[in-house]
Amino acid sequence: MAYGYEEFKADVYRMTDINLNLYKERQMKRRIETLYARKGFKGFEDFALAMRKDKELLETFVGYLTINVSQFYRNPDQWSFFEKKVIPYLRENFGDRLRIWSAACSTGDEPYTIAMILAKYIPLSKVEILATDLDEQVIAFAKEGVYSSKSLVDLPKDLLNAHFKKVDDTHYQISDEIKRHVTFKKHNLLKDVYSRNMNIIVCRNVVIYFTDEAKDEVYRKFNESLVKDGLLFIGSTEQVIHAKELGFSSMETFFYKKV
């Protein structure tokens, strides 16, 4: 039998614990074909064989697979709503001792954005911010906390000045004060156990790559992970289609409340 995409998916699962069956097939298959062609491989079998022997190539593949696109203060209107409406809501309902989960956090831009905004209103010593991602390389990058000026282009100047130090003409280092209040861990949304008793979960522009069944399962687990009246903050291209059935009501566009 010829080796094809089905066999490749099985090999990837054995090597990485990533289940490609839970991703939209046409979209993901095309992405992988583009990657292996760019790397000089002729097909899925050649690519899988090479990844078994080359750890660096496998890590590159996982990083490519997890689609790490991130930016500080991405979609500024959403972050403005987060600051003006969501933070007061969280404090009114839960006080200042908050548990926050930035799921699929990529290079850390999102959880650090959350920490910087919260620091204007709450001592960060009272807040737990968990940031997770499937890709260990981006977690390592996030822990270093050095970012290009391009990723900071939308960040308000007051936050930039308060929490970053310029390293050179094109790079900035985030402050240790912000770094120490974000805990980074590896986590697979499609496989691993979810943390509980979260007041807000932020997961933006990630589940759009999953199948509809996988999306519903992730949102169901997010609901279980939240405390009653806790919030889910999703991305600008996303919508929780079966919100009511999954235990959510819409608070505002891109924000859902556990009911």
Image (tube, grey):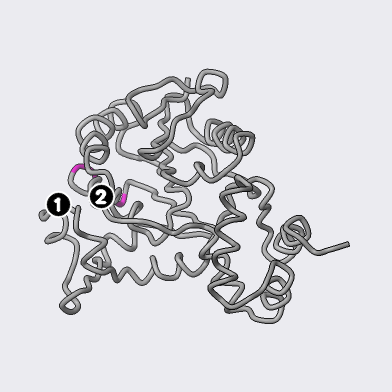
Comparing 167 with 117, the one in front is 167
In the picture, measured across the screen, residue 129 lies left or right of residue 209, that is: left
Badge 2 vs badge 1, beta-carbon distance below 8 Å: yes
Q: Residue at x 58, y 79 (%)?
A: 56
Query: Picture coordinates of residue 3 (x, y %)?
Result: 80, 64
Local secondary structure at mark 2: loop
Q: What's the mark number on residue 156? A: 1
Cα–Cα gap, marks 2 and 1: 8 Å
Query: Counting other residues with Cα less than 10 Å from the Cα at mark 1, is it few (<14), some (14-19), or many (20 or more)?
Result: few
Magenta stretch: give its range: 121-125
- Residue type of the residue flagged with mark 2: Tyr
Local secondary structure at mark 1: loop
Q: Residue at x 55, y 67 (%)?
A: 35
Q: What's the mark number on residue 73? A: 2
Which residue, as the protein is rendered here, is positioned at the far right?
1
- In the rendered view, tell whether residue 9 sits above or below residue 45: above
Q: Residue at x 48, y 30 (%)?
A: 227
Query: Picture coordinates of residue 236 (x, y %)?
Result: 35, 38
Query: Counting other residues with Cα less than 10 Å from the Cα at mark 2, is it few (<14), some (14-19), or many (20 or more)?
Result: many
Comparing 99 with 7, the one in front is 7
- Residue type of the residue flagged with mark 1: Pro
Query: Picture coordinates of residue 150 (x, y %)?
Result: 23, 64
